Amino acid sequence: MKLAPYRGWSETARRDLHLALLTLALFVIVTAKFPVFASPHNLAGLLDDTAILIMLALGQMLVILVRGIDLSVAANLALCGMLAALFNRAFPGAGIAPVLALSLVAGALLGAFNGILVWKLRLPPIVVTLGTLSIYRGVIYLLSRGAWVNENEMSREFVGFTRAQFLGLSTLSWFALVFAAAAIFEMRHTRIARNLYAAGGNPEAAAYAGIDPGRMQFIAYLASGAIAGLCGFLWVSRFAVAYTDIALGFELQVIAACLIGGVAIAGGAGSAGGVLLGCLFLGIIRSSLPLVGISAFWQMFINGVVIVAAVLLSARQRRQVRAILEAR
Amino acid sequence: MSPLLTLTDIRKSFGGVRALAGVGLELHRGSITALLGENGAGKSTLVKILSGVHQPDSGSIYLEGVQTRMSTPVDARDLGIGVVHQESLVFDHLTVAENLFVNAFPVRRGLVDWVSLRTRAASVLRELGADFGADTAVTSLSIAQKHVVQIARALVNESRVLILDEPTASLSKRECAELFRIARQLRDKGCALLFITHRFEEIFELADRYAVFRDGASVGAGLLAQTSRNELIRLMVGRPVEQLFPKQDTTPGETLLSVEHLGRAGEFEDISFTLKRGEILGIYGLVGAGRSELAQVLFGTERAHVGQVTGHADIALVPEDRQGQGSILPFSIAANIALPNLMALAPRGWIRSRAENELANQWIQRLSIKAQQPTQTVQSLSGGNQQKVVLAKWLARKPAVLILDEPTKGIDVGAKAAVHAVTSEFAAAGNGVILISSELPEVIAMSDRVLVMRRGRLRGEFSRAEATSENLLRAASDA
C-alpha cells in the first residue's frame, strides 16, 4: 500500500494514518453487508469487549518501547483478579475503592518484580516474563486451591462496577477511553515518555544524555504491571468469575495489538494512537466474525495473518528507508 | 597497459535520490587508486555496485576489456572482486579459518574437510604475515585484525580487485602500517586496489593514483605524483578551502577545571592538568591510549578510582561514536537536541513542541545544519550534519567545558571546517574545550596547548609553538 507522501509527517504518523484508513475500510465493509454492525448498541458492545485489550496493550507498548516484552501480563491480570475476588468475598462490605487500590498495587508489585530482574540482574526480558508468567499462574492456584470464585460469592457493587452505564457506555469503556486519551497525550508531550523512547531507541546515547535505560525499563514494567493489576479487577468484575485460567494466553493478543499498531518489536518506535487502532482493528474483526458466519476459531488464524502482514509492511518500509540511506 | 577494471558513466538512483550521476573509474594492475570525495559524493554506492549489492541503472563495467554484469555479491566474488568493509563484515562466532572459507568450504566425500581447511587458512595467513592463527575465534580479534581476515578471504577467493572501504577509520598508527604493508604486498602481486579514506596523509603514503567524486560525478583522476593535497581538496569541495582550521586567538583566563592524579584501573593513571577559560586543550595519542576513557570519567559516565577533579564547571561530552553514543537515529533533530535539555525545556514534565522546534531551528541556523525541518529524523542526515546535531544538543546546555572526542572523524571537509569554527567560537567566548583527536593537523592547528597520552599516562605537554608533528608523534609512540 503506497499512498502519497505527506511532507513533514513522521514515519509513525504515516503508519498510524494507514492503519486508521484500513480500520475504517474494514468497518465500512462490514457495515455495508450488515448495517446492524454500526448500530450504537453494537458499537458500545464492541468497545466494551475491547476495553481491557486497549489498556493492557498500552501498558505492553511501554515495555516493548524500551526493548522489553511482558509475557506475564495476563497471568498478572489473573492473579490480581483473584486477589480482588478473594478480598471481596472476605470483606463484601468494604466497597470498591479498596478493591481498586489492592489490584492496582498488587499489579504494580508484580510488574516491579519483572522490572527489578530486568534492570538490576540484567536478565533477558523474554526469559524473565516467561518465568513470572508461570509463577504468577501458580500463585493463583495456591491462593484459590484451584477453586472458582463465582458470582454469588461477589458483592453486588463488585459485579455492577464495570456494567454501570454513563452516557450510553459502560464504566469499563470509559476507563479505556480516558486511559487511551491520556496515553496519546502523555506519549507525545511528557518528559518521561520521551525518556522511554530514547532509552529504547538507543540505550547508549540515552545513557550519555543522563537517562538510565535500565531504570526506564523498570518504570515500563511497573506501569505495565499496575495496568494489568487494575485490569484484573475489571475482568473479574465484568465476567463475574475468578479462577486460575482466566485470560489464559491473552498476552499474545495484547502483543499482537501492539505489533499491528506499529510498535517496533526492536524498541524505540510506536505510538499510543497506533496501539489504540491496532486494538480496534482486532476488536472489529472479532465482533464481525459471528455476523459474517465464520467460526470464532478462525479468529486466531486471522489475527496471525494480520500480524504477519503488518510486520511485512513495516519491514518493507524500513528497507526502502535504508536503501536511501545506504546510497549516501 | 589497459586497465584491469573500467567503469563508464555509471548512474544509480534510489527512489528520488540520485546517488551516482554518471561516474567513471579505472583500476590498474599493480596499482593502488585512492577514491576521494565528501560524504554523499557516491563512494559507498560505488562500492556497493562493485560488490554486486546494487545494480547500476545504466552504464557499463569492463573487466579486462570484457563487459560484465554483477547481479549478486556471488557474481562479484567469482569475477575476483573482494571488499574489505569499514565495519568488518565477518562472522564473530566462527574461527578465522571458517571465516576465510565461508563461501567455499573444502569438501571431501560430502563432508567438510577440516584438515585441509585449517592448513589452507594457515598458509594464507602466513603469506599475509598475520599475527593470529587460523583457529582463533574472530570475536577475540581487533578491528585491524578483522580487516586482515577480510583481506585473507579475498585472497582465498583469488580476488584480483580489492576494495578497501575506509579501513583505517578506527585503526591505530601501527595497525595502519601493518595494513599498508599487506596492501603493498598485494599490489606487488599485481592486484588492483581501490582505497577509500578521508585522511590525506594516508593517500599520499599508500596510493599512486587518485579519483575524486563530487555529488555523484567524477571530477578528476590521475597520478598522485602530478597533483597536490590542495588541488585534491579543491576538487572534492569544488572551491578552495582557505580556512579548514579557523582558530581564534585568545588569552587564557581563570582556571575552569583542575585535574589531579586522576586514575582508573586498567585504563589510565596519574593524569594531572588544568583547563583555563578561553582555551582549547588538545589531547593527542594513539587509539587505546586511554583518552576516551579519561573523557568519560571527566564527563561522569564512568567513575575514577583515584585522584580528583575540581572546578564548578558544567561539562558536556560529544562522544566518539556519534551514531551509537551521540544521537538517537530514529528521533527527529528537534528531539535529539532537546534530549539532554529536557529539564530546562520541560521543568514540570510537559514538553511543548513549539519550544522544542524553536530550539532546534535556532541551532539548525547557527550551525547551518542541512535539513528541511526540525522534525526530520537524524538518520536521514549525512554524517557531518549528524555530528552538528550532536554538537548542538550539548552546546544548547550552555556548558562551561566541552569535551570533543574525535569530533571530525569520518565527516567531510565542509562539515569539518564548520565544527572547527563552532569550537573556536565557543572557546573564544570564555569557555574551555578539551579536544581529543587522532588527527595531527587538527590537534596542531586548533589547540592552544597539547597533552600527549600513551598507554594511559601523560607523556608530555606542548605549547602551541612546540606542538609540531614530530614532537607529538615522538611522545605518542613507543620510541
Image (cartoon, coloured by chain):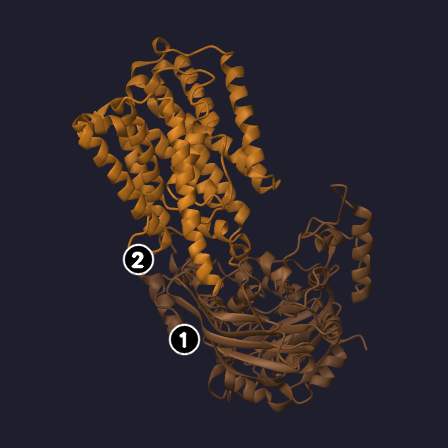
Chain colours: A orange, B brown
Q: Position of residue B5 (x, y in %)?
A: 60, 73
Quadrant of image for the C terminus of chain B: bottom right
Instruction: Report the chain holding disc 1.
Output: B
Three-letter residue code for mark 2: Pro
Residue at 58% across, 77% down: B26
**Element under disc 1:** loop
In the figure, B248 relative to A130: above or below? Answer: below
Q: Nearer the viewer, residue B192 or B392?
A: B192
| Residue B131 picture location, percent across and down | 80, 63
Circle 1: is it few (<14), some (14-19), or many (20+) Cα within 10 Å?
some
The residue tagged 1 is B368
Residue A191 versus residue A72: which sits nearer the camera? Answer: A72
In the rendered view, does B407 fall on the left or right side of A80? right
Cα–Cα span, label 2 and label 1? 26 Å
Compared across the picture, whether A268 is left or right of A177 comes to: right
Disc marking residue A5: 2
Identified at 79% across, 46% down, the residue is: B114
Against B131, is A112 above or below?
A: above
Toward the viewer: B362 or A257?
A: A257
Asked if badges 2 and 1 are on one and the same chain, I answer no
Mark linked to residue A258: none
What secondary structure is found at the residue carrying circle 2?
A: loop
Image mark 2: chain: A
